Image (tube, rainbow, N blue to C red):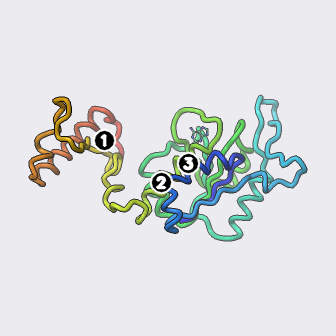
Amino acid sequence: MRIDIITVLPELLKGPLDQSIIKRAQQKGIAEIVIHNLRDYTTNKHKTVDDYSFGGDAGMVMMIEPIDRAISALKAERNYDEIIYTSPDGVKYNQKEANKLATFKNIIILCGHYKGIDQRIREHLITKEISIGDYVLTGGELAAAIIVDSVVRLIPGTISDETSALTDSFQDNLLAPPVYTRPSEYKGWKVPDVLLSGNFKEIEKWKEEQSYERTKRLRPDLLDED
Ligand code: ADE
């Protein structure tokens, strides 16, 4: 899978995407993540990417031209399954959407900044708007990093234990059961007996019950989702 990210702050994205599992996915050729500096697509001397908003609202707006030039240059090279804009007024991101994005071949993520982007970009160039939650970040870079991280780890081959991404919280709309490791007792705090029993069937049953109970208690809204 190839992910192109368009941003005014490339440095903010490089760090989070150059570590551990996501770094290895890139080294293995499973994911190609290319970060583009929007300023490279400007034609003016000062590499300006924003301007005052019509109507006099406070705050700067990202201009059409550099974004159009950046997206057009990428589209001339390959077809894209989705051109995403990260914004607090997008559709709220979840595991279902991550699963869907992980099946795509090429996507672009445009990171928003300032007061937002000229509405015409959203209408004519963007195919999907994603919010990572009901709070406002200073820019879309951290949102893009979250989307990329959650998608790349789902691509087959990224995580060595193939089943582990499938047993995450939220797959099947359930939270994951609690996990334990050695020692089986610490300061009198015990691991549930069933996990030490060696009875595989009982263990599976316990995990399912725990998943369901935790979901019902902590995130009942998930049980209503399809
Ligand atoms: N940019 C600013 N806030 C955001 C959010 N909550 N989700 C996605 N992009 C954003």
Is residue 122 shown to the viewer in this render? no
Residue type pointed to by label 1 = Leu
Q: Which of marks 1 and 2 is in front?
A: 2
- The residue under the point 77% across, 36% down is 60
Q: Is 169 positioned to the left or the right of 10 in the image?
A: left
Quadrant field for ligand 1: top right
- Between residue 184 and residue 216, name the one nearer to us: 184
User: Residue 206, position in %: x, y?
Assistant: 16, 45
SS at circle 1: helix
Q: Does the residue labelled 2 lie within 8 Å of ligand 1?
A: no
From mark 1 to mark 3, how far is it between C-alphas?
32 Å
- The residue under the point 69% across, 46% down is 9
Residue 211 image-quadrant placement? top left
From mark 1 to mark 2, how far is it between C-alphas?
33 Å
Which residue corresponds to mark 1? 223
Which residue corresponds to mark 3? 16
User: Residue 154, position in %: x, y?
Assistant: 42, 58
Residue type pointed to by label 3 = Pro
Marks 3 and 2 in Cβ contact (< 8 Å): no
Label 3 neighbourhood size at 10 Å, few (<14), some (14-19), many (20+)? some
Q: Does the residue labelled 1 lie within 8 Å of ligand 1?
A: no
SS at circle 3: loop
Which residue corresponds to mark 2? 20
- Between residue 123 and residue 4, name the one nearer to us: 4
Label 2 neighbourhood size at 10 Å, few (<14), some (14-19), many (20+)? few
Q: Is mark 3 within 8 Å of ligand 1?
A: no
Q: Is residue 14 above or below residue 54?
A: below
Residue type pointed to by label 2 = Ser
Which numbered tag is attached to residue 62? none
